[in-house]
Amino acid sequence: MKILAFSDVHGDLNYLKEVYRKSKKENPDIIICAGDMLNFWEYNNKIKNSLDNFDKKILLIHGNHEDEKLINKLCSKNIINIHKKIFEFNGLNFVGYGGGGFEQEDKRFERFINKIKDKLKKWILVTHAPPFNTHLDLVFDRHVGSKSIRESIEKFNPELNICGHLHENFNIRDKIKSTRIINPGPSGEILKL
């Protein structure tokens, strides 16, 4: 499967144009946005119109710059909010958890993952926050990511964790056990499974 992943566009149409061009060139099976599509809780019709031009399924979650209600306004038949949901596509379960980005422990996330743990086979975790103690959460020589996300990755072994939030770490990759972790940034990256 070929995935086009991106995050942290913050309402910048130029980034969405880059992602659109990559989509046309690479022909991914699915597109994933790991949060912060919009900027500071401002709904933007131009963003909605741009997303509607993609001819692929787009799965997204909210980040810390918008809430779930705003993300739901962007949704349509092919644009799907997967926050606290499982979306099955081509034999893979995409599990989304948006928002946050600043808490190292998130009991709501832990409860959500434990509630769906029986469905966590051949799955991809999409979060806005990066997992703790990786190259993706290192800011000024300090790890600031989510311990809850890291523990869930260690326990339930997703194929991949697509995250965002920390602009300092765009296009950075790491691994926890066998799980690949990536912050694709706003220009997007092609990932193959």
Image: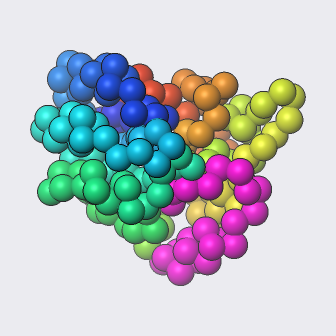
Q: Residue at 34% of width from left, 33% of height from top? A: 4
Name the side, left or right, on which 94 lies relative to 100. left
User: Which range is magenta?
Assistant: 93-118
Residue 63 shows up from this direction: yes
> In the figure, is residue 70 to the left or right of 149?
left
Identified at 86% across, 28% down, the residue is 141
Residue 45 found in image quarter: top left
Q: Nearer the viewer, residue 147 or 36?
A: 36
87 with respect to 169 (left or right) = left
Where residue 14 appears, as percent x and y from the top left, is 34, 19
Residue with the most extreme right position: 141
Q: Is residue 136 placed above or below 88 in the rendered structure?
A: above
Look at 46% across and 48% down and name the residue there: 41
Q: In this view, does 154 lie above or below 58?
A: below
Question: Is residue 95 something one can see in this rendering?
Answer: no
Give the quadrant of the C terminus.
top left
Hey, which residue is sitting farthest bottom in the picture? Answer: 115
Camera-nearest residue between 146 and 190: 146
Here the colouring is rainbow
Expressed as whole percent of the image width and height from the top left, the position of residue 174 reads 64, 34
Q: How many marks?
A: 0
Residue pictured at 57% horizontal, 49% vertical: 64
Instruction: Please tell me whether residue 95 belongs to the stretch shown in magenta.
Output: yes
Residue 43, percent from left and from top: 35, 46
* Closest to the observer, 94 or 101: 101
Q: In which quarter of the image is residue 144?
A: top right
| Front one among 141 and 75 | 75
Q: Quadrant of the N terminus?
A: top left
- The reply to whether the magenta stretch includes residue 56 is no
Q: Where is residue 79 in the image (x, y as percent from the top left)?
A: 24, 51
Q: Is residue 13 above or below residue 60?
A: above
